[in-house]
Each structure stands twice: as C-alpha cells, then as structure tokens.
C-alpha cells in the first residue's frame, strides 16, 4: 500500500460509478440475452432494477453519495430493434436520461456495446462475421451523431476479450460457442469494429471523444527473480493486455481500464504456466483482490500508449459490505500514486452504482454502492458509499 493515506486527487478528477443497459434497465426484449433467458439457458433478467423507469432516483442517489460522473450504456436493441429501423422514441428516452444526468452535474460516459446484441444482429452471426461490422458502425455513427450534445465521453466496446471469451471460447454466454478459433476471430473483428466505428464517428461528429473499455489483468511472476516465471509473465501480459490494443493503431482518444483480476504466474516443467493465488481477500465471487495491480496497469498503459486513462470499472461483489470501502480506498490510493508519477488518469468509475443483473450469475452477486431489493425495487445506500465524501469532502 502506498505510504500516503490522505487522498489528493486532481480537482477535475471524475469520481463515478458504472452500469450497463441490460444489467439494470429491465425488459430488453429485443436482444440475444433476453432470447436465451426465455429459453431457460440464462437467469431471467425481467425488470432488472427497473432503471429504465427509475433512472432519476438512481442518479439523485449517485449525486447524494458524492459522485460527479456516471458511465452508462446504450442498448443497441432498443435503438434498432429491427434491422435498419431506428426507433426515435428510444433515442429520445436516452436523451432525457442524459439530460437528467447533466442537470445533476454528472459527467457522462456512454458505452455503445456492452455484451448484448439485437437479436437480428446475433441471428446474422454477430461479430463472428466480418461483413456484419458495418452494421455496428452504422448504429454507432447514428447514436453518437444524435446524442453528441448529451455525452462527454464515448466508449465503443466493453471488454472485447471477456465478450469473445465467454461467448465463443468458454461458451457460457450467447451464442454458447466453444471454439478457440471462432473466439479469436470475434476478438479480432471487435478490433476492426472499433477502428471502423472510430473513423466513421469522427467523420460525422468530429468533436466526439471516443475510446473503449478494456479488461486488463495484472500478471506478476510468482517467483520474482525466476527467469522462466518472468518470461511467462511478460508473454501473458503482452498477449492478454497489449495485443488487442496494439491492433487499434492509436485510434482512440482515451483508454478505459476495467480492473478486477490479478494472477501470479509460475512456470512448471510438466504443466506449463500455472496460476498461483496470493493470500489476498476474496470477494463473494471468489475473486481475489489486489489493489496494487491497478497501479502497475495504469502506469503500463500510460507509458505504452500515452493517452488519457479512465478506470472505467473496478468493483467488488460483497453483500455484507464489509470490504467495499477499503477496496475502493486502496485502489484509489494506487491510482493516485500513478497520477503523481505522471500518468494521465482522469477518472474512476466504481462497478456498480446499484446491485445489478450479473449475467450468468443472475441477481446473487452484490456489487452495488446501493442495495436493491429486487421484489420491491427499494434502494438502500450501503454504508461503504461514504468513502466518496471522505475522499472528496
Ligand atoms: C463487466 C460487467 C460485470 C462486471 C462484474 C465486467 O467484466 O463489464 O458487466 O457486471 O465485470 O462481473
């Protein structure tokens, strides 16, 4: 832990929280997740947190706990429920949502693709097919142009490696494919999709600030001086954290870092590279927490790409709320250390503002700063949220 325990974040630093459309809005009936939920392959999201109707209440709470920014996502299947038919009522809905955030003084970051696809696009093969990329680009270009005055920062794609891995390699997300080659193709097509969207957006909306959110894992050698552990770590880091970003040819105005995981790597003659866990606190999902990793990853991103960085996600599933405050505090202290050493980190978005529909794990994991009772939809601010006022009184 850095020695400095008093917070000293830059005055214009964004302190926010994140969410994604399908995880909170409810009734996203035109996307691929909903389709598979009805088939019983995935937990039913139903009305989720009913954020579609309760966004005002949620943003007021965000403001009350001391946040000055929010990252939300736009649901492509609402904007374009049928191929080529853009729904102006959906655009106007998001305009109202975003104007409401602005009125509350919340800086707005918006993601264009956060894991869910319109069913028609999924049925055409989604990002498996290179020729489908232009359909995503058309949607992205349209939305950014329409909502250009309501958004401060755009993120094209959320976590390309998590999406292509879970959907096409591990096969636990739609379309439940288990094929390493298909997964690789999707991963690579997502890089092409980002570049094409970036270029198209800049043509029609030059003022738009466009980046993306990448989930990077902090890898360290299990035995710090062991040459094979060090080589294994470097290679894993390069492929896992840099390869995809390198493919983007600097076509991004900022980088979003989602940080949840670290792995300590050990080379073993018989088994190859194995993961060894540190003795570190575990979240309710069994994920070990390692705040220092955020420092190494942000300094690495900064020295490699030299673009502004936002921590677009960092959070913990912790129903008892006895780890969250310390978790946030420690991560922010390491972010501050990176800033003081010169990294241009401009904001931190905790995942998530409220409890959400946590994909294949349904409603069990509790990531929220605000607890949601999914029967009554009553919101209760968790005590850990006080950290933000402590950091910025
Ligand atoms: C995703 C979120 C998810 C969170 C916690 C991130 O990988 O972007 O959608 O809820 O992790 O699992």
Image (cartoon, rainbow, N blue to C red):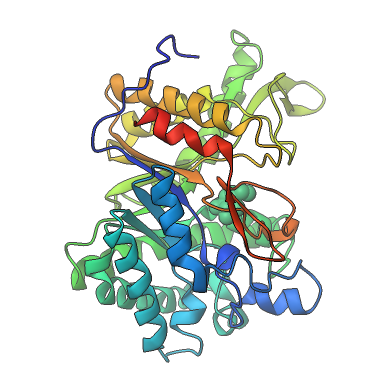
Q: Nearer the viewer, residue 170 or 286?
A: 286
Q: Is residue 9 left or right of residue 233?
A: left
The residue that appears at 38% across and 17% down in the rendered structure is 6
Q: Residue at x 68, y 30 (%)?
A: 288
Q: Nearer the viewer, residue 161 or 384?
A: 384
Q: Residue furthest left?
A: 206
Residue 52, percent from left and from top? 51, 72
What residue is drawn where x is 65% and y is 23%? 264
**204 displayed left or right of 14:** left
Residue 265, by quadrant, is: top right
Screen quadrant of the C terminus? top left
All told, the count of numbered labels is 0
| Picture layout, residue 239 above or below residue 106 | above
Question: Where on the picture, by quarter, is residue 153?
Answer: bottom left
Residue 361: image location, x then y, percent: 74, 56
In the rendered view, tell whether residue 288 sits above or below residue 224.
Answer: below
For residue 112, say whether it is visible: no
Residue 39, position in %: x, y? 79, 78
**Where does the image place residue 373, in percent across and percent down from the top left?**
68, 58
> Could you say which is closer to the camera, residue 122 or residue 267?
122
Task: Determine the residue positioned at 38% across, 45% down.
Answer: 67
């Amino acid at each position: 832990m850095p020695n400095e325990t008093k917070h000293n974040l830059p005055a214009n630093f964004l302190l926010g929280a994140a969410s994604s459309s399908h995880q909170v809005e409810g009734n996203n009936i035109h996307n691929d997740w909903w389709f598979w939920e009805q088939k019983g392959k995935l937990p039913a999201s139903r009305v989720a947190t009913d954020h579609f109707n309760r966004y005002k209440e949620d943003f007021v709470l965000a403001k009350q706990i001391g946040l000055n920014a929010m990252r939300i996502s736009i649901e492509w299947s609402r904007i374009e429920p049928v191929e080529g038919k853009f729904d102006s009522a959906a655009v106007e809905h998001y305009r109202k949502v975003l104007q409401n955030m602005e009125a509350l003084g919340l800086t707005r970051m918006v993601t264009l693709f956060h894991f869910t696809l319109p069913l028609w696009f999924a049925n055409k093969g989604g990002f498996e097919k290179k020729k489908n990329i232009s359909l995503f680009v058309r949607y992205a270009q349209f939305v950014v142009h329409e909502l250009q005055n309501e958004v401060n920062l755009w993120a094209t794609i959320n976590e390309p490696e998590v999406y292509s891995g879970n959907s096409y390699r591990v096969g636990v997300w739609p379309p439940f494919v288990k094929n390493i080659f298909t997964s690789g193709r999707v991963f690579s097509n997502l890089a092409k999709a980002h570049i094409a969207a970036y270029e198209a957006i800049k043509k029609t909306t030059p003022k738009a600030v466009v980046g993306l959110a990448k989930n990077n894992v902090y890898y360290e050698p299990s035995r710090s001086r062991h040459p094979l552990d060090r080589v294994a770590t470097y290679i894993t880091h390069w492929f896992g954290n840099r390869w995809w970003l390198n493919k983007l040819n600097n076509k991004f105005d900022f980088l979003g870092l989602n940080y949840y995981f670290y792995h300590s790597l050990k080379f073993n003659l018989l088994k190859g590279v194995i993961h060894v866990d540190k003795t570190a606190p575990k979240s309710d999902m069994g994920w070990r927490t390692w705040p220092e990793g955020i420092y190494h990853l942000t300094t690495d991103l900064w020295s490699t790409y030299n673009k502004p960085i936002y921590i677009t996600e960092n959070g913990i599933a912790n129903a008892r709320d006895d780890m969250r405050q310390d978790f946030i505090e420690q991560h922010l202290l390491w972010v501050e250390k990176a800033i003081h050493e010169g990294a241009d980190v401009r904001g931190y978005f905790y995942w998530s503002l409220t409890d959400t529909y946590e994909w294949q794990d349904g409603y069990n994991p509790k990531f929220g700063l605000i607890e949601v009772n999914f029967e009554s939809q009553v919101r209760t601010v968790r005590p850990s949220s006080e950290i933000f006022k402590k950091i910025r009184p």
